[in-house]
Image (spheres, rainbow, N blue to C red):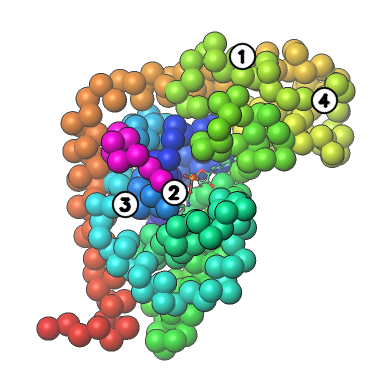
Amino acid sequence: MQRIFSAIQPSGIPTLGNFLGALRNWVKLQDDHECIFAVADLHAITVWQEPAQLAQQTREIAASVIACGVDPGRSVFFHQSAVRAHAQLAWIFNCVARLGWLNRMTQFKDKAGKDRENASSGLYVYPNLMAADILAYHATRVPVGDDQRQHLELANDIAQKFNHDYGVAFFPPIEALVLGPAARVMSLRDGTKKMSKSDPSEQSRINLTDDAETIAQKIRRAKTDPQPLPGDPAGLDGRPEARNLVGIYAALADTDAVGVLREHGGQGFSAFKEALAERLVATLAPIAAETRRLLADPGTIDAILREGAERAAAIADPIVAEAERLVGFLRT
Ligand code: TYM
């Protein structure tokens, strides 16, 4: 059985993008994989997080992930800072990865923006920590949204260089699982920008905790163009907002753009948006309710994460200890 690793940052409320691009697939993969999932709080502090909020956000994200269907009985589920192996292996990888590789990372360029000199060095080496997250478990498959592809290519480069430099076949190759018709959900205000939990505009995203009225209102106001929906996917070229809404609908209805347009082609956006909002509410309302229920008992969430961290450490510690031995650290 192949081992899966994936993670989500506690840098805000999870969005529809997180759900369709990642969380929904995590849930399905539990049936036929050994799964390890984390709340990536070490990654979150690469940009400023209010200390008073970070712990609570970690709990909230954990509750959302469980409410989506990740089962902490079947899967290992924990928060990253509770397992030391991540930071230990990341340091070794900081010394394996080349500056030239990191300089090519588009997400760093996007996140650092114009004020690069003022970005944290953690933000720069963030992909090395991601590689450590996965490789500390010798995981081979990583379900993510499309935006993480480049980071996983880098993780493979790191694994290969480590193996080559130390003359071993220690770290396995990693396969990115970018699944479904909504692997890249775009902002509702701008179809060329990714939907993100850290976008300053609330109207740009659907949060997994939004109520029915908020979802309907955000979809109603979502940017579109004046044309009706085309009859086939070729007609979505040059219409990023239309393409985005069709992709979201396809994911929710378990079909593809062809299927959606067969049914809705020729329709104006107001009718289509109404149907889309209905589907969204049907999928997200039970998740929001379950998240609220879980958050009423933070002690239980903390206990789940604590137990998950113990199980995670039991897998990662021996692997990272072996990596340290290969590097040549003195073990007395
Ligand atoms: P994060 O927290 O930004 O997002 C969590 C997951 O959601 C996916 N995602 C999206 N998918 C489709 N459309 C979108 N608009 C969208 N926005 C986010 C992401 O691709 C991701 O799968 N660096 C990672 C967290 C991480 C990680 C790892 C992932 C840390 N260590 C190891 C995999 C393996 C991140 O920031 O995800």
Q: Are marks 1 and 4 in contact (CB under 8 Å)?
A: no
Q: Residues within 10 Å of mark 3 (few under 14, many from 20)?
A: many
Q: Is residue 125 above or below residue 66?
A: below
Label 4 belongs to which residue?
225
Location of residue 309 with respect to 91 vertically, above or below:
above
Q: Neighbour class for label 1 at 10 Å: few (<14), some, many (≥20)? A: some
Q: Which residue is mark 1?
A: 217
Q: Is residue 8 above or below residue 277?
A: below
Q: Which mark is residue 80?
A: 3
Q: CA distance from mark 2 to mark 4?
A: 35 Å
Q: Nearer the viewer, mark 2 or mark 1?
A: 2
Q: Secondary structure at mark 4?
A: loop
| Image coords of residue 233 (percent x, y) | 82, 36
Indicate the amino acid at tag 1. Gln
Give the residue displayed 31% in from the left and 83% down from the top. Answer: 326
Q: Which mark is residue 47?
A: 2
Q: Earlier in the sequence, mark 1 or mark 4?
A: 1
